[in-house]
Image (tube, rainbow, N blue to C red):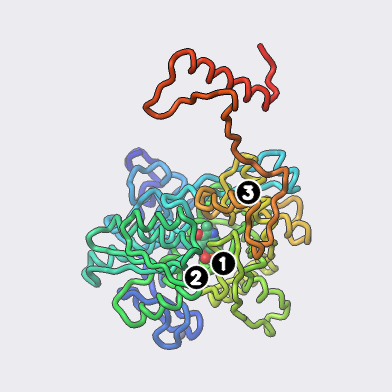
Amino acid sequence: MKLEDFPKEIQPYIIPKQNGELIYRCLNCGLEYDIDQLLYTCPHCGQVLLIYDRNFDQLKKIPGKLWHQIFDYRKMLTIPALKGIYRFHEFIGPIIPFDAIIYLGEGHTPVIEANSLLQEKVGIRFYFKNDGQNPSASFKDRGMASALSYIYYLIQNRHVSDVLAICASTGDTSAAAALYAAYLKPHVKSAVLLPHKKVTPQQLSQPLGSGAAVFEIPGVFDDCMKVVEALSETYNVALLNSKNAWRILGQESYSYEIAQDFEYDMKDKVIVVPIGNAGNITAVMNGFLKFYETGIINTLPQILGVQSKHANPVYRYYQESDAKKRKFIPITVKPSVAQAAMIGNPVSMPRVIHLVDLYNRVADQQKVFFVEVAEQDIMDWQILANRSGHIACTHGGECLAGLVKAKAQGKISKNDIAILDSTAHALKFSGFQEMYFENCFPAEFEILPDKNLINTPILLKPKDLEKFPAPGKELPEDDFKRFVNRISEEIAEILDLQKV
Ligand SMILES: *Cc1c(COP(=O)(O)O)cnc(C)c1O
Ligand SMILES: [Zn+2]
């Protein structure tokens, strides 16, 4: 729809203006820094940063109801820059000009209600938000669209040139980084560091296909992260891990979309997210806080963070109920099917501590909860979900297992409505499904398949047939007829089909 076709009173708001004033703020010492440079940690105290808008209060002058109309009407625009996460431009990156925005189809992923059978089993109404339907098949595209749009803006303003973008990854960050960097060729090149054999073949194929330099390192993600940090402190590279606060800003779009998907009514809603490096839950909390402060939503939804027992440092931290006694202790992770969240020392932990406290204070009650789940439950629930029409990855299964656990523990009530983050596409993690169906998980995963959930292909090659068709080798007519008949008979027998 063209701008002049929108209602007159809404027209001045439809196309966002570049009038934010963004700064990095240190969560520890409070110092602020200009955003004309790429900063990851506070030069003064070394702590992680978040991006704030000095003009944020201006956004409060627009009534919540009007914001609803602005975002809802913006859906009808055909301007590519505003089709993805920047539909919420004022909240995502109000200084980024349209011609710097990179849109590859990210965001606005579908929200799919579970069917009644599955809802009955779980005992609560719930939806999956399929972030696996992003361009590189995980939610990481949201943050990369933001980080790379910002880098492109710096390039356009000649603050930087010939950027080498670098990241450590459990698989999906590198896939997204390589994809968005490839689009900015020749201005940006990318290099990714992956823990050797700790990403799936599909995830490994992605940065290779996008033309990134791919390095495999012995160890786990936390080890790769240390190398990348050392590189970014010593060399002229652009760090694309979620230490980069621009990633967080882009990932806040997840919250904005949920608000819009549910008509901005967050009453009785529970947002369920898996936690790895904790960038996602940081963004989700910050996003809802911003919409709450501007009156776009008038309730803060509950947030349920889920971790596997094999990688649970955040869950452990919050086990101590007395906030003053809490002490963060990094852990050594064990193998997990929620492999993209297999992180023992999350970079965003200081942000989580800051925001959980703020979120609960603003809501004036505890709204953020954490649970841990067994590897077995992650697999069982993922497979059950997908047998009910979903495309959940193992982390989606982790969310569902977490929902069941939280309900059993009374952390959420049966009248709540849950929105679960299926953070990636099921296909990225199909190797774990295969291990489940073939009952060949290495012992340290502690997973045994439920026989009722196993599904394997049946090879049909009747013994009484001698000749089979093959590529470029047609069978003579009689042989081929026999082949079709015999195979049909076998299928009919297995499926117990009745003749018409
Ligand atoms: C990165 C990732 C996570 C973990 O998100 P964090 O922001 O690191 O907490 C979960 N699931 C998938 C599929 C991921 O790629
Ligand atoms: Zn500081």
Q: Give how far across and how far down residue 398 sits, in percent.
A: 63, 57
- The local crowd at label 1, few if under 14, some if 14 to 19, many if 20 or more residues have their Cα within 10 Å, is many
Regarding mark 2 in the picture, which secondary structure is present there? Answer: helix
Q: Which residue is mark 3?
A: 438
Alpha carbon separation for disc pair 2 and 3: 27 Å
Q: Is mark 2 within 8 Å of ligand 1?
A: no
**Amino acid on which the number 1 mark rests in the picture:** Met
Which of the two discs, 3 and 1, labels the residue nearer the N terminus? 1
The residue under label 2 is 221
Q: Sequence order check: which comes first, mark 2 or mark 1?
A: 2
Query: Are the residues flagged by discs 2 and 1 in contact, CB closer than 8 Å?
Result: yes
* Pointer 2 or 3: first along the chain: 2
Choose between 40 and 183: the one closer to the eye: 183
Q: 445 or 443: which is nearer to us?
A: 443
Amino acid of disc 2: Phe
The residue at the far bottom in this view is 44
Q: Are marks 2 and 3 in contact (CB under 8 Å)?
A: no
Give the quarter of the image for residue 183.
bottom left
Question: Does the Cβ of the disc 1 residue fall within 8 Å of ligand 1?
Answer: no
Residue plotted at (65% across, 22% down): 492
| Secondary element at tag 1 | loop
What is the CA distance from the residue labelled 2 to the residue labelled 1? 8 Å
Q: Quadrant of the C terminus?
A: top right
Where residue 420 appears, as percent x and y from the top left, is 61, 53
Visible in this render: residue 237?
Answer: yes
User: Which mark's residue is nearer the viewer, 3 or 1?
Assistant: 3
Q: Residue at x 36, y 38 (%)?
A: 1
Q: Which residue is mark 1?
A: 342
Q: Amino acid at mark 3?
A: Glu
